Image (cartoon, grey):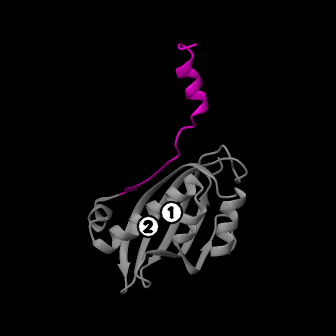
Amino acid sequence: MRRWMPCLLAVIVPLHAQAEWRAANPDVEAAAKQPRIAAALEATRRMDKAILERDAEAFEAVFADDAVVNNPFNRIARKADAMANLRTGLIHYDTLERSIEYAATRGEHDVVLMGEETLKPVGKAKFAGEEIRRRITEVWSDASGTWKLSIRQATIQRPDPK
């Protein structure tokens, strides 16, 4: 039985989901060293981790109360909609990686992040089992003293038909 134990554990213990962001260019690498941008990127990491771990409390904590999302399904969603989508499994990913192509401050309280994310939906999520690429734009705000997602645009990229 001891010989089979590692194989059994490999089947029983699920692999942890992965989330990461990377700078797509030297400008973003430099911008990420600015305290406000670094804080917004950390908030982004917390949001992605909450999504992958299906942690509704942590997910809710990163949204501004008046947050609005133009989601990948061409619908406007508010904070409550995003929470419902996480709880019902419509937001459920195995992996989530971001390539940040633009990061900059705007005004006294906002940071804009733009780029692309690659993810693999699972379960009841639309496109489960496929690798999805999306163009994203996010505005993170710290007016309350804590970085919150205020605005998000996500557009699914489809390969060009041949």
Instruction: Examine the rendering and report whether any part of residue 150 can be seen.
Output: yes
Residue indicated by mark 1: 47
Residue 114 horizontal/vertical position (percent): 45, 67
Residue 110 lies in the magenta stretch: no
**x 70%, y 66%: residue:** 84
Above or below: residue 137 compared with residue 45: below
Q: Name the side, left or right, on which 58 lies relative to 74.
A: left
> Can the viewer see residue 78 in this picture?
no
Residue 91 placement (x, y as % from top left): 65, 58
Crowdedness of circle 2 by 10 Å Cα count: few (<14), some, many (20+)?
many
Residue 20 drawn in magenta: yes
Rendered position, 83 above or below 97:
below
Q: Amino acid at mark 2?
A: Ala
Choose top left, top right, bottom left or bottom right for residue 151.
bottom right
Crowding at label 1, few (<14), some or many (≥20) Cα neighbours within 10 Å?
many
In-image side of 102 versus 156 (left or right) = left
Q: Which mark is on residue 144?
A: none
| Tag 2–tag 1 contact (CB < 8 Å) | yes
Task: Tell me the quarter of the picture where residue 71 sits.
Answer: bottom right
The image shows residue 77 at horizontal and vertical percentages of 66, 74
What type is the residue that disc 1 sits on?
Answer: Met
Which residue is pictured at 33% across the width and 74% down the height? Answer: 36
Q: Residue at x 27, y 71 (%)?
A: 34
Stretch of the chain drawn in magenta: 1-24
Q: Mark 2 — residue?
A: 43
Q: Residue furthest front?
A: 1
3D distance between C-alphas at marks 2 and 1? 6 Å
